Image (cartoon, grey):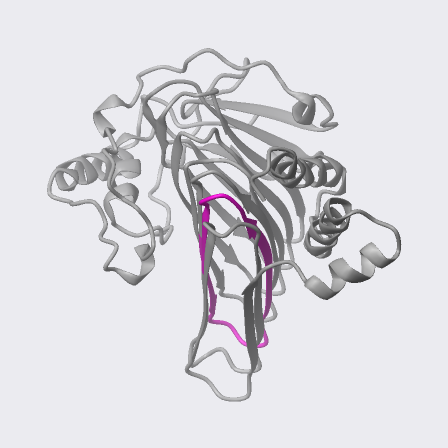
Amino acid sequence: MTAPTIPGTDDPAWLAARRADASGRLDDLAMPSERDEIWRYLDLDFDPAFDSAPSQPGTVASPDELAEAWTGKIVSVIDGFVTDAGVSTVISASEPTDDGVGTDLFATAYDALAPGAVLIDGDHLGEKVFVDVQSTGAATTFPGVHVEVPAGSEASVVVRFRSASDVPAVVVPRLTANVGDNARLALTVIQDWNYQTRAMGRAVVNLGRDSGLTLSEVGLGAKIGRLHLDVNFIGHGSWAKIYGVYFGEDDQTLDYRYFMNHIGTNTRSDMFLKGAVEDDALSVFTGMIRIETTGVKTEAFQTNRNLILSSGASAQSVPNLEILANDVKCGHGSSVGPLDEDQRYYLMSRGLTPDVADRLQVRGFFEESISQIPHADLRPWIRERINMKYITAQEEGRV
């Protein structure tokens, strides 16, 4: 099997031109403003320190239990660089179509400074691929992953982001995917950064005719863990199922901006995210279902549920619809609230202590979403990490 690839220093003319253009614009761009709806609720008072981007990868962290249990291909991306032996330098000679990531400060910095992106394509579809993305030092890095799923094929990819313990860093990840006609992509994204990392993530998935996407996002770490996701339903009959679980503690901010853009006819999307916050943590969900005039017979739904486990924690949940076509079915729902007192009382009446009753509530709350994560072998690890966050907070008297 051919190894995943990354662009190198012998860049084609189009890439050199794009980097030069982005570099020329970067100095004129300001940090995004909280007054902009797409950045609302975020504390952006920090130095992105783009000039600290490393010229070579740092020291690779040892595989942990999650990577060691993986049965497929593992690719390491260290500080934006692929470090696996045998990885070759391959890049398209012609300029690709616009990936739709935008031109804000972070997107422009990525275009100017990213060393490249791992390419998972038709040569790598014979087994599951685990991309272990690591940030190793106090620097700003630009890791990238691109998945190309040819027509009629299937791909299974996990992207796990992590950073060295107790090291402040800024990371600007980019994840893009093209899913061809009648193709399928199962994708799980895990944000497991340390609590001093600010991650400004961007993801775009384009779906062809009768293609399908099952995507799950697991938000565990980061001081700011942001994922701005666009799914573009370009082909007739394309569909996506989006699941999310996230748990914030301390002073974390977990920020999700999900946009389902229905362009083709007879497309379907279903977003289902569940999250919890404790201590002084903040979660943000902004969901948009946009149906273009061409998107007739679309069915699209979004749901976001949030648990508030401490008086200092908060959650913002803002679902939106923008419908420009007729003959569609759409719906959205959100909730923000504490654990259910009636459920606690019932469980205690069956002999459980208050702490154990609350643990069962938290576990049951997340299970509805965890059980839908497409990579079933990851679910026990995710379940354990989610549950231990709450158990530890109980034992320390924080909830």
Q: Quadrant of residue 376?
A: top right
Q: In the shown orientation, is residue 381 left or right of residue 35? A: right
Instruction: Name the spot of residue 316 as percent of width and height, x first.
Output: 44, 60
So how many labels did they put on this image? Answer: 0
Q: Does the image show residue 378?
A: yes
**Was residue 45 drawn as part of the magenta stretch in this picture?**
no
Residue lying furthest right: 350
Q: In the shown orientation, is residue 102 left or right of residue 346? A: left
**Was residue 278 drawn as part of the magenta stretch in this picture?**
yes
Closest to the observer, 125 or 249: 249
Against 164, is 198 above or below?
below
Image point (64%, 41%), residue name = 390
Give the main secondary structure of the magenta stretch: strand
Closest to the observer, 382 or 113: 382
Q: Does the image show residue 258?
A: no
- Highlighted magenta segment, given as a residue range: 256-285
Quadrant assignment for the N terminus: top right
Closest to the observer, 67 or 89: 67
Residue lying furthest left: 28
Instruction: Name the spot of residue 52 as percent of width and height, x first.
Output: 25, 22
Against 255, is 271 above or below?
below
Instruction: Name the spot of residue 143 as percent of width and height, x first.
Output: 41, 31
Instruction: Name the spot of residue 239 as percent of width and height, x first.
Output: 61, 64
Against 326, is 238 above or below?
above
Image point (40%, 21%), residue name = 167
Against 159, is 81 above or below?
above
Q: Quadrant of residue 117?
A: top left
